[in-house]
Image (spheres, grey):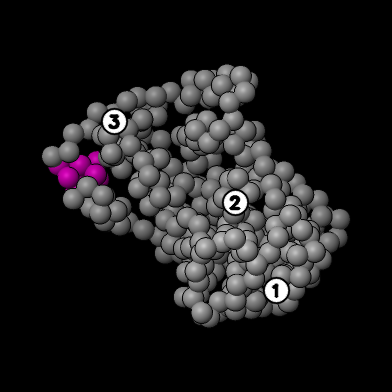
Amino acid sequence: MAAIKNVAVIGGSGAIGKPVLDALVSSGKFKITILSRSSSKSRFPASITVLPVDYNSIESLTAALKDQDAVVSTIGMEGILGQTLIFDAAIAAGVKRFLPSEFGSDISNSKTAALPVYEHKVAVRKHIEEKVKNGTDITYTYVINGTFLDWGIEVGFLVNWKEGKPRVFNGGDRPISITTLGSVGLAVVGVLSEPEETKNRSVFVHDIVITQNRLIELAKSVQPTKKWDPVDDDVVEVEKIANKKLANGQADMELMYEYLYVAVFGEGYGAKMENVDNKLLGVPGKTEANIKAIWKKLLV
């Protein structure tokens, strides 16, 4: 397939979007266009074209995506389902590659896909794959990176360091794949640089495989005086309680995070990647020294 030059980014100022955008710009390989709501206050480098769009209008989206080779969506959880309209607009505009906002767990795993937190991602995948199967002239790539390393530590998702009372799931020794936001950006650059090798499939990338207990050990090595009082939690019980709350009408982000814990630390959800595309995508990975550097910023 032809080289990708013109790339439209959706959500370029968010937690995922900014490092993805930074990687695309730093690569020097692409002409970048940002699609943004007219009400957005975000600012971007002068070299980037910013087009205001109505995300509820396929006509507005199609016009904005004209002459784009690829679309990279980094939309947050609240906007995931709206990607079906963006994808249809990309088809109408003649876009050749679409990267939906996956960036996390592998929902080709049936146990993972069944979790309520991924309902909209599953629906978007189904929409994309049905259109491609029926002969639509567009391709896709799903970037699967496991849990975010830097974000996961900083906000306390992987380890609750602020209170020093982290939830340690089922003993804390389950190995999981984790990836920095910067490496996710490199993976996106790699996908767009290798369009044929990454066509119509998931690509897998991680920086390191590690356990919760090892993350805590690295934190202790950085700040030995900090007190830790881990709280053991059972993933199976976490899911049972979450299901009861969902059945009773709760469906907020707090509950969805419980399902994320299940996907990351539960057995059989594929949170540890066995085969990755790091070499193809140009992602070198990280070491424990990089993790210690994150802890130093937070604890020292």
Q: Residue flagged by tag 2: what amino acid is it?
A: Glu
Q: Position of residue 91 (x, y in %)?
A: 79, 64
Q: Residues within 10 Å of mark 2 (few under 14, many from 20)?
A: many
101 within the magenta span: no
Label 2: which secondary element: loop
Magenta residue span: 217-224
Position of the N terminus by quadrant: bottom right
Mark sitting on residue 165: 3
Residue occupied by mark 1: 68
Residue projecting furthest to the left: 225
Residue 290 visible from this viewpoint:
yes
Is 243 above or below relative to 48?
A: above
Q: Residue flagged by tag 3: what amino acid is it?
A: Lys
Residue occupied by mark 2: 102
223 within the magenta span: yes
Residue projecting furthest to the front: 39
Q: Indicate the quadrant where residue 31 lies.
A: bottom right
Comes first in the chain, label 1 or label 3: 1
The one of 10 and 20 positioned closer to us in this rendering? 10
Q: Main secondary structure of the magenta part?
A: helix
Residue projecting furthest to the right: 134
Is 253 above or below relative to 127?
A: above
Q: What's the residue at 48%, 24% (across, down)? A: 238
